[in-house]
Every structure is written in C-alpha cells, then in structure tokens.
C-alpha cells in the first residue's frame, strides 16, 4: 500500500466516523509546509445555526486562527494536507485511534489502536461558552449600548462584547499573580467611553469579590461626565472617572496601571507613572511609535538591516519593535518581569502589541547589564534618546 492509498484509507475512516457519529477529533502535526510559524491543525465538530460543520483550529507559535468548513470542504482540504504539508495525522473516534505517519520523509505507516468506548463530544459552538462578564443584569452594558434591556447582546455589538471578555480573560490571569490587597487601586489611563474600565471593575468587584477602587482618566470632559453617570446608574461606588492627561495624573498608591492605545510617548508617560508609583502590574498596548522612528530617520545609521529599513513600511515596523523592546528593558531595569505578546481583540480589530510588567522582587538582573544593552540598541539604530529612558533619568 503506497503513500496515497494509506492517506485515502485514513480519510475514508474519517468520513465513516462522521457518518456513523463516532468522530471525536482529528489532529494534524509534523508540519513541513511553507507557512511561517504554523505548527498544528485541530479539528472538531460544531453546530452553527443548526448546521453541522468542522472547525479547524490553526495553531501558530503565538496565536490560534479558527476557520469553519462544511464536511465536503473539510474532506477536500484534508486530501491536500495529509501526507503533503503534514506528515502526521491522528483520528480519534469513540472506539479507536488511527494514526497516519511518514517517517523520515520515506517510510509510511497507518496504525489502528482500539481504545475502548468513550462518549462523543458535544457539538455546541464556542459562542455559548461561559463568559467572565455575563451580559445579563448589567446596567452599564445597556447604557453603553452593548445589550438591550433584557441583557441580550445587540447584533452590531457582538464584536465589542467579545473584545470586553477577551480583555478580561487576559487581565484575570495577570491579576491573580500579584500580591493580595485589602483595597486594590487601579488606574485606567485614557479610558475613553469606558467599555473596558467598567468591565474590569465589575470583574474584580463582583466576580473575584475583591474590594477595588478604579479610576478612569480621560481628557474629554463629555466622556468623563457620561461615564460617571453610567457608574452611578450601576451602583459602582468604587469606580469614578476624572478629567485629565496621563502626564498630569497623580499615580501615588496605584497597584495596577493600564494604558491601552496611548499614542506615541503617552505610553512612555503611563509606564513612567506606573514605575514611579511602584505598581505591582503595568499593562500597556502602545499606539504609534513616532518618536523613535524620527530618531532613526534623522541619523540613518548604516547597519546590517539597512536593506530593510530603507523601505518606509519596514522602517515603521522596526521602529515599533525597537521602541517596545527598549520599554521592556527599562521596566526590567526597575525590577519588573516583562511579557510582550500579540493582543487581538476581535476579528475586525487590528493586532496590537501588549506589554506587561509585573513587579518581581526576585528579579536580580544586573542594572549595568541592562544599561549596556539599551546603549548598544540605541547606537545600532542611531537613536539619540528614548522618551521613557529620559523620563526615568537612566
């Protein structure tokens, strides 16, 4: 039996398991294709609007992408993938496991193993999963025009509702890592209309049952007044909004400082406020990186990546990475453990980088070593100064 015959036998078993309702899951591994950072694909059955489909989760190094296909579309796709881009395919049913594998690019095996009886998984779509922020009995969600009076999410607000919950999922894990506080003090810089600020207060106060004071800082007075009225409507006594800028805000005593989409050096101002306050947690999602780009354009240092940075779009991307990389090093200089990752709020929102600094009393990284790395980075890219570095006086 050759390669194509064994692959076809595997796919026939897959089709049969769908027909007799014994399919459990299918996975593809040992990727040999050309798509950068793709590692695996996982398949499961789902039910969308009473129609059965197969959900493909494309697992990349730093993110997952989910696509849903009809059974016939899924079969055609698997024919193209198994034995070509993926050299391992594993089918699990309620009674057996079947594995197709190409060894060292040559020898091909198809192994079947009886597993005993097990139950087929539910086909309920992920949309019905439990959210950390429920839509029911949330006056602020109604005031913010996310839900109707009965708590049903408006069709045109589904993306915003998912964004709120995705944000809370990220913050929930970070909050659990910081020391306990009798009354947690949170500042949300540039809070805008307050969607995420309200949700964070609700989660800490009513889901975690932790006493919290949250301040939303916003320079537009109309939004400040609107959000304070909504907070009063919801009985959120520990949440208030105040008019002002990040630079002028008194961050003293702030345990968690957040700044999402603060433009250019306003992100540096927010990080500065967090470090100055000795905050346990600093979370920023930067927007624009003009200061460092101007520095790089001004000095035009010749280096090994000049072949990239001579193109404007690549220079912009490089400036973003350099800006945020130095921000992380400055945080580490002041005793913070850092994480930088991609924050995708929903399918219709561009990707953002999120920088997280967690106060780490065990962080013994040499400050002199960090300063040397910052200096080397600046020299390499022709940067005279970084705004955060200058504000911190290092």
Image (cartoon, rainbow, N blue to C red):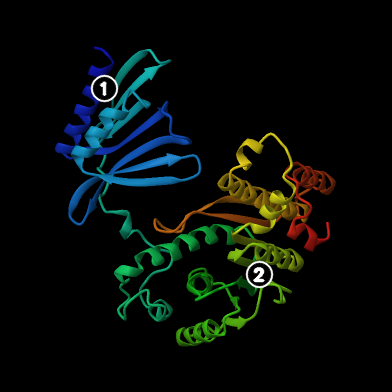
The quadrant in which residue 182 appears is bottom right
Q: Closer to us: mark 1 or mark 2?
A: 1
Residue 311 placement (x, y as % from top left): 58, 43
Pointer 2: what residue?
181
The quadrant in which residue 260 appears is bottom right
In this view of the protein, which residue sits in the foreground, 118 or 65? Answer: 65
Residue 343 placement (x, y as % from top left): 51, 54
Q: Secondary structure at mark 2?
A: loop
Residue 110 placement (x, y as % from top left): 29, 19
Q: Is residue 149 left or right of residue 341?
A: left
The quadrant in which residue 254 appears is bottom right
Q: Secondary structure at mark 1?
A: helix
Q: CA distance from mark 1 to mark 2?
A: 58 Å
Q: Is residue 294 left or right of residue 35?
A: right
Q: Is residue 169 above or below residue 201?
A: above
Q: Is residue 327 above or below residue 262?
A: above
In the image, what residue occupies the spot 67% across and 68% down? 255
In the image, what residue occupies the spot 43% across and 45% down? 64
| Residue 206 visible in the displayed image | no
Residue 22 placement (x, y as % from top left): 20, 38
Pointer 1: what residue?
7
In this view of the protein, which residue sits in the foreground, 260 or 183? Answer: 260
Other residues around mark 2 within 10 Å, as few (<14) / some (14–19) / many (≥20)? few
In the image, what residue occupies the spot 29% across and 42% down? 44
Quarter of the C terminus within the rendering: bottom right
**Mark earlier in primary sequence (1, 2):** 1
What is the total number of numbered labels drawn onto the structure image? 2
């Amino acid at each position: 039996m050759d390669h194509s015959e064994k692959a076809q036998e595997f796919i026939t078993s897959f089709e049969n398991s769908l027909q007799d309702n014994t399919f459990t899951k299918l996975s593809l591994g040992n990727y040999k294709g050309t798509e950068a950072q793709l590692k695996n694909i996982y398949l499961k059955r789902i039910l969308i609007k009473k129609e059965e489909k197969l959900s493909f989760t494309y697992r990349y190094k730093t993110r997952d992408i989910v696509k849903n296909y009809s059974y016939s579309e899924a079969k055609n796709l698997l024919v193209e993938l198994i034995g070509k881009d993926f050299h391992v395919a594993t089918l699990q049913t309620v009674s057996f496991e079947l594995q197709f594998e190409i060894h060292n690019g040559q020898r091909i095996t198809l192994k079947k193993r009886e597993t005993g009886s097990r139950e087929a998984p539910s086909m309920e779509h992920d949309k019905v999963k439990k959210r950390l922020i429920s839509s029911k009995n949330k006056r602020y969600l109604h005031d913010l025009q996310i839900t109707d009076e009965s708590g049903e999410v408006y069709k045109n607000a589904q993306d915003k509702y998912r964004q709120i919950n995705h944000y809370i999922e990220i913050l929930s894990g970070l909050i659990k890592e910081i020391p306990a506080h009798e009354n947690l003090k949170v500042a949300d810089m540039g809070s805008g209309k307050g969607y995420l600020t309200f949700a964070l207060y609700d989660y800490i106060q009513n889901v975690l049952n932790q006493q919290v004071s949250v301040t939303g800082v916003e320079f537009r007075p109309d939004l400040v007044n609107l959000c304070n009225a909504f907070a009063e409507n919801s009985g959120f006594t520990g949440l208030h909004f105040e008019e002002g800028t990040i630079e002028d805000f008194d961050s003293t005593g702030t345990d968690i400082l957040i700044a999402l989409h603060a433009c250019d050096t306003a992100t540096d101002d927010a990080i500065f406020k967090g470090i100055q306050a000795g905050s346990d947690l600093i979370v920023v999602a930067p927007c624009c990186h003009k200061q460092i780009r101007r520095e790089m354009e001004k000095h035009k240092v010749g280096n090994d990546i000049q072949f990239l940075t001579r193109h404007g779009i690549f220079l912009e991307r490089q400036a973003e990475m350099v800006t945020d990389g130095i921000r992380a090093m400055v945080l580490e200089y002041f005793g913070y453990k850092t994480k930088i990752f991609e924050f995708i709020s929903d399918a219709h929102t561009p990707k953002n980088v999120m920088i997280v600094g967690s106060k780490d009393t065990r962080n013994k990284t040499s400050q002199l070593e960090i300063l040397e790395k910052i200096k080397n980075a600046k020299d390499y890219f022709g940067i005279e100064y970084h705004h955060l570095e200058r504000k911190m006086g290092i």
